[in-house]
Amino acid sequence: MVRLIGYFFGLGCILFLGAAAAAAIYLSVVSKDLPDYEVLAKYAPPVTTRIHAGNGALMKEYSRENRLFLPIQAIPDRVKAAFLSAEDKNFYNHPGVDVGGLMRAVAVNLQNIGSGRRFVGASTITQQVAKNFLLSADQTFDRKIKEAILSFRIEQTYSKDKILELYLNEIYFGLNSYGIAGAALTYFDKSVNELTIADSAYLASLPKGPSNYNPFRHPDAAMTRRNWVIDRMVENGYVSQSDGEDAKKQPLGVVPPKNGPSLFASDYFSEEVRRQLIDQYGEKMLYEGGLSVRTSLDPQMQLEARKALQDGLVDYDERRGFHGPIKQIATSQDWGSELAKIPALGDVPEWQLAVVLSVSDQTVDIGLQPSVDAAGKVAGDRKRGTIAAADMRWAYRSANGAKTAKSPSGVLNAGDVIYVQKTGDADSSTYRLRQPPKVQGGLVAMDPHTGRVLAMVGGFSYAQSEFNRATQAKRQPGSSFKPFVYAAAMDNGYTPASVILDDPLQITLSNGQVWKPENYEGEGGGAHTLRFAIEHSRNLMTVRLAADMGMPLVAEYADRFGIYDHMNPVLAMALGAGETTVLRMVSAYSVIANGGKQIKPTLIDRIQDRYGATIFKHEERVCDTCNFSEWQNQDEPVIADNREQVLDPMTAYQVTSMMQGVVVRGTAAGKVKLNTDVAGKTGTTNDEKDAWFVGFTPSLVAGLYIGYDTPSTLGRGATGGSIAAPIFNEFMQAATKDQPPQKFQVPAGMNMMAVNRATGMAAQTGDPDAIMEAFKPGTGPATTYTVIGGGDASAQVAPEEILKTSPQANQAVTSGAGGLF
């Protein structure tokens, strides 16, 4: 018996040693293929890039994984407690693998064999970190062994808080949210600090199976799992019994899924910022780099710009008549469900989709588009309203402007899907007929002293068209380019009182063709000052001036101001025949407005990386004395302006003064009315395909154009003065309403002298046609009447011959905006 016992003991020892050797060999083989766990020290997960307005408001987020990284110190204890209770209550006590929990899981699984119940796991938080960061999700024995080995090594290398930090920032919560900060915003629209016990418990329930506890698809399961976590928090001593019971009584409180934050009316601006970030840093940095971008957007000014441009586009479009319904649907069945399927213009909340239910000669009965819940089902009652005949009278004309109807019954039919806008208060059921305009446009507002773009509107609606007409549409600026021709002239010996011939002109081109530029309304004749030429947008005078200077000089100025990259130096370009963008034109006008300083237009003030380090800032001015630690009676800090002076400040003032005349008595007379100094220029291109106005006050520049995306005529009389200037006026009135009146500052050394507005010579005392004109030192009114462009050389005419040469010299000619040809 002793020998038999000895035999079995020896056999057992051999088997044990063999098994131990085999296990050692197996572990050695498995350990050779383990990934380097030290990479956790360099953990840099994909993090959401966030775009902010100038006032800090969140505009947009861009990410592939919706994640915001939070250090463990920023995560509240109740949130940590919820995850420890749900996932690993012994986290702070075990060495990486919870042996007790593992044995309990094995026992439970043995009992569940054959019962059909799901096996339970026993992975610790450390094991989940090892799996999520370093291993695959394969359900194999080898992977579990590797996971355990890595867990022991991770615990020996990193603190418990560091491991928990990695876990809470990496895990997936569903709805494309990663990490606790992203999940808090996605499910509750709260920061982590605002999460309640119930909120924290629900989020802690999600890592086990986000789709199983989706609150919109499985609300009962989500509630049950959340309450289970609350019970574990109470059981583990993190929450009192009473607080736990109160928490379980709370509803889930999740918010409906959103497409992400979006500051109202900022879509065109945000998209332009996105494009610039990709160009500068690449897509990976944008969608994974966790950039924090502070833009120059002024949210209130953006709303005002949007409203002004939309009002102008709608007003122009409605004067051209009705385009017809958006769609036709049946009204005999459940019209609400059919109407709910049609996408509305989400960024034009003032308008609603509606279906015509019945029509009479006096009113139109409509059904309004119902709302849809998170599951995509129509929610709420079917609301109705009416359109009075007076609120759709504009639609009696067809799209070509011809009157085709006398009452609503001649315009709409039952089943027509249309847009409407409420006409009364919130309780009103009366509406006005609306339609998305076919005409489009772009508007930009800028601080002329810094180049910061404060507002940008790229069209009527971003939902209608994502094409940004403020930055992407290249259009002919027409006569709005002329101020730069005159700036070149003022910089090169001409004055606002210089006189140029306005007679008909024809030029033989190198190919033998004859070009005959004309003034907008065809009239002309005589000779006038440069001030008159720009105020009344005289094409013939501008061409003669450009020819007299030489187009290479004009091209050099156009390139200097950034209007074009390389302007073709041909005479037609002096009338704005090239193609440029609204942003470039506004930037160029800003140089005139700020006294000739070069600026770099920007939509971005500052960019910080995921660690808070500034990697870009627009401000390049230097302040060497701004960082004193204490006051010691030193002089106030001075910010050195190191920008290049690209235009003589006196020239800038002369052109500004001339453009003030455009607003007072020229092509924009009566269209722009502000309580502050304002200057600007209209522009109308050939065949009225584009209408422009660009102008400025001492502190704000704005410009816009209106035109069809496929250039076609806007109609006779659709000039920059008639349709673009009123939009500029509406915007600028709103943008400057809270500002005190400002004056354009006359540069030191400039001489203000009275001249006769017709002859450009010194005015006599009591002259009713006298006007104060700005002259640089060493210049002044001509002593003899000199007309530029009278022939091969300037015509020298005696004063007494003025009326013979210029019969219109003493009368103000009120013509149109001036065009391209």
Image (cartoon, grey):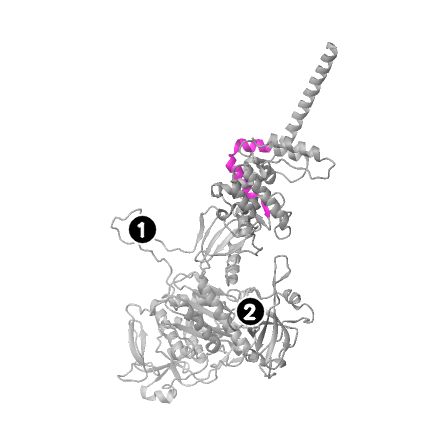
Find the magenta span and give its range. Answer: 150-173
Q: Name the mark on residue 625.
A: 1
427 left or right of 605 in image = right
Say which amino acid is labelled 1: Thr
Decide: is 615 above or below 92. Answer: below
Residue 33 visible (yes or no): no
512 left or right of 497 in image = right
Residue 733 visible (yes or no): yes
Say which amino acid is labelled 2: Trp
Q: Residue furthest bottom?
A: 804
Q: What residue did someone put label 2 on?
A: 351
Q: Residues within 10 Å of mark 1 (few under 14, many from 20)?
A: few
- Residue located at (68% from left, 36% from top): 140
Q: How far is mark 1 from mark 2, CA to CA?
A: 54 Å
- Residue located at (60% from left, 77% from top): 364
Q: Residues within 10 Å of mark 2 (few under 14, many from 20)?
A: many
Residue 493, x across and y down, in percent: 35, 73
Per the image, is 79 magenta? no
Residue nearest the observer in this picture, 815 or 575? 815
Q: Main secondary structure of the magenta part?
A: helix
